[in-house]
Image: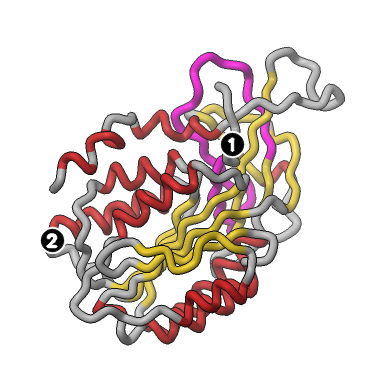
Amino acid sequence: MHGHSMSRLALIPALTLAACWVVAVTAPRDLHAQAGLRERTMFVSALNSRGEVVEGLGTSDFVVTEDGRRREVLRVSSALEPIDIAVLVDNSAASMKAIPSIRDGLRDFATQMAVGNQIALIALADRPTIFVDYTSSPERFGQGIGRLFPMSGSGMTLLDAIIEVSAGLRRREAPRAVIIPIITNGAEFTNRYARDVVAAVRQAGASLHAIVIGNLTLGSTEERERAFALDQGSRTTGGQHVTLFAETAVEQALLKLARELTGQYKVVYGRPESLIPPEKVEVASARNGVTMRGTPARGQTGA
């Protein structure tokens, strides 16, 4: 492990990161007269047992807690805010059978997601390489997809890519950000600690949605850190970790993710004024059979 590449992020206490995004917007007087109430926003996916979006939910269906304390949900609406989407594709030697399905799936995904949002394509073989910088043009994104080929003799650099993409997202201003690794179970070549990778994603205010083709191997330290980063990163940022057993399932997984992202709710809740930001913000469903995952809005500041 190369200590110098990990030291900076490792110094940031992971539990304080959840609060880095969050901020004060003046509460409407007709809703709340009490002094010191601040509003916070989360973007929430509400899904049924098949992973499909549940529509028509209202304020009473969402349970928001900060460090275990329930907060009042003030308003719920469809999330229309733009999303920065970073797609990280494994084009290492192990991706040979998967690349055609990944290409097809990404073309459909870009058609659904590029317009109104900004989408980037980063390849992972040997070193993270930007194939398409953030664009709202499905055509430009499609040109990058056409250049995706497996690179013989190479391994992937997923953990480096997540850290670099997260750093880039911190300089961008969209209210929502999503990192989508699409990888095989091939060799991981980067020396990063999972905790640093997760910390970087949380600092960026992004959610991590990992699509993995095949069961991840855990033979090397790098592969164990990768598996842990994807598991922890998806669970603690409002994302998900999907394992597919056939390359051809990539298209459906990406279309389902597109439906989830376009069907998110914007949940605004009240937080009493406090000098100490919460360590953990969580959302849960008050309705049986509905699972919720939430990510605080980016760019929120203040305690």
Nearer to the camera, 218 or 61: 218
Q: Quadrant of residue 149?
A: bottom left
Q: Looking at the picture, how far across and down is residue 201, in whole percent?
A: 41, 46
For label 1, the residue is 299
For the point 71% across and 42% down, which residue is it?
60
Q: Looking at the picture, how far across and down is residue 120, in whole percent?
A: 51, 63
Query: In this picture, is 264 found above or below 302?
Result: below
For label 2, the residue is 220
Nearer to the camera, 108 or 211: 108
Number of marks in the rendered image:
2
Nearer to the camera, 248 or 138: 138
Is any atom of residue 242 visible in this view? no
Circle 2: residue type? Ser
Circle 1: residue type? Gly
Q: Which residues are magenta?
A: 268-296
> What secondary structure is marked by label 1?
loop
